[in-house]
Amino acid sequence: MGKALLIDTSLLKTKNHYPDSTLNDSMHPHMTKNPAASLSITQGLKLTWIASAFYLKLCLICMLSLGGLCAKEAPNFILVLTDDQGWTSLSAAMDLRRTDSKSDYHKTPNMDALLERGMRFSNGYAAAPVCSPTRYSIQFGKSPARLNYTRVLGRNGADHNQVGIPQVLKAADEEYFCAHLGKWHISADPERYGYDVHDGKTTNREGGFTMKNHIREWGGYSEDDPKRVFSLTNRAIDFMQKSLKEERPFFIQISHYAVHSDLVYNEDAFDEVGNWPDGKVHQNRAYAAMVHNLDQSIGLLLEAYDAMDLAENTYLIFTSDNGGMPTLPIQLNKGKPYPAGLNSPLLRGKWDLTEGGIRVPFAVMGPGVEAGSQSNEPVISYDLLPTLADIAGATDALPDELDGRSIRPVLKNPDTKIQRPPEGLVFHFPHYNVVGLNEPHSAIRIGDHKLLKFTSSKRELLFNVADDPSESEDLYEANTALAGKLNTALETYLDAVGAEKPEDSNSWKDWNGRSGATKTLFLSRYPK
């Protein structure tokens, strides 16, 4: 049971530094202030967040627990969603069997600690290779193909009359207190789905992304609160404290703007990273400093988690909305094979359905989850809603036609197999995109095998991604029967859910797609 240990979060804020950001002062049922607007920084005031973390730790060690106040038996949930974070971006391996599944440059001791305190999923997937469709999938437990929303730009065909995470939890216990802080990127207000506290319909802009200065965006620059990582965490801690004080179970989703561009960091992180030796895969100092600041904010969250004694009753879930950038800076690649990519050993990255675009960090810590454990069972973003419902005893409130399945049995036993429908995990990106593979494509994973299908090229690739996550060897010619089985399952599913067709995309007839005449350069990797 979580104890109501009240943390003085003023130690994390210099006076008047974030006048509108504390929940104690500004919380109301539908908080829709612009987070960026609330971050006006006092001229000449330098906030050193490493020192703040030290003061917080000192505070937590010295403070006494207040007896008599505790969370209800209903479990609490903290979902930390990062933006564009690659599978190999941590200094801890996402697959303990593979030494190349971690960064050779970044240092992320706090995210590493999160993995070590719980279960890491070596085959954790984002529902889409771009951000917004994955965020829909998390909230509603359905694939982007079923939701009819597979791309950030262009038409949004999603029906927003959906049932979201707070509504499901509140059906089990109306006392659930629910918050979403940070990047929402869904075209409907969070209040509609039962969020009591939220930042409104935020997108990348509130995190500092403007696309107005290419050199500044990719060269990097410093701010005291880079990508809002510290203020988001401070506010999350305030919310958790309030929940415990009011004896209410809680769900909070902390949707970080990091590590999406712009590359933003504080000066201390940039200086520290300057002392690290470059890696062979990762070498970008500005990006590494931004990752370092994100890691520090995760450390503050873990400190608060321990201080509030939440381990007995609170699950902390950590994942990303899609794979990492394939290169820095962005390139108009049109599918041409990269000499090397930032998600290596995974192929390519954001925007593509190769492993680098959809395999992401994924970990869970909490009651009953064995520390230091690993599951190799494939899991995906849209599994989160049914998992939370299962743990909270709210499965009766789940909507129909879910694609997700509860991973609760896996949290008890990492060798458990999830019973999924025959279609397995389906991914769909029916668009042209000059910074990606630049051809409509879909993918399906069933068991160890993955089929990657290209519409215009009329070509299919087959990989054993359990043994070959680099997708280096096309097994199609040697396994046509298996490829046919996966293709049938893929097409059956896409037809059944009425998935968007390439011809429906605004990219099909534009200057690039040319009504399907354009074909990806990617297939030169796999000559017939």
Image (cartoon, helix red, strand yellow):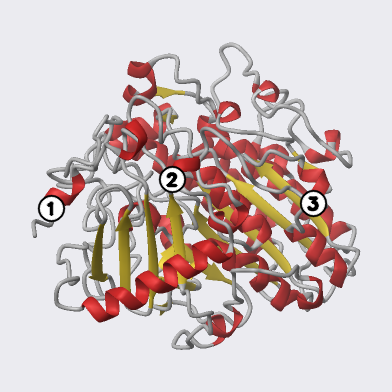
Q: Amino acid at mark 1?
A: Arg
Q: Is residue 486 above or below residue 136?
A: below
Tell me the mark number nearer the camera, choosing from 2 and 3. Answer: 2
Q: Is residue 377 above or below residue 47?
A: below
Q: Amino acid at mark 2?
A: Pro
Instruction: For marks 2 and 3, give the CA distance.
Output: 31 Å
| Towards the viewer: 15 or 402 | 402
Left or right of 459 on screen, residue 14: right
Please, what secondary structure does the residue beneath circle 1 have?
Answer: helix
Q: Which residue does the numbered mark 2 point to in the structure image?
A: 502
Residue 246 placed where, x, y %?
90, 58
Residue occupying image coordinates x 71% and y 47%: 180
Q: Amino acid at mark 3?
A: Tyr
Q: Which numbered disc, 1 or 2, marks the residue that appears first in the sequence?
A: 2
How packed mark 1 is, by other alpha carbons closer than 10 Å (few <14, some 14-19, many 20 or more), is few
| Towards the viewer: 296 or 90 | 90
Please, what secondary structure does the residue beneath circle 3 have?
Answer: helix
Instruction: For marks 1 and 3, give the CA distance.
Output: 45 Å
Left or right of 520 on screen, residue 71: right
Residue occupying image coordinates x 22% and y 53%: 344
Q: Which residue does the numbered mark 3 point to in the structure image?
A: 193
Residue 294 placed where, x, y %?
48, 43
How packed mark 3 is, by other alpha carbons closer than 10 Å (few <14, some 14-19, many 20 or more), is many
Left or right of 34 on screen, residue 207: left
Quadrant placement of the C terminus: bottom left
Tell me the mark number nearer the camera, choosing from 1 and 3. Answer: 1
Task: Return the mark for residue 525.
Answer: 1
Instruction: For marks 1 and 2, give the CA distance.
Output: 23 Å
Hey, which quadrant is residue 240 in on the image? Answer: bottom right
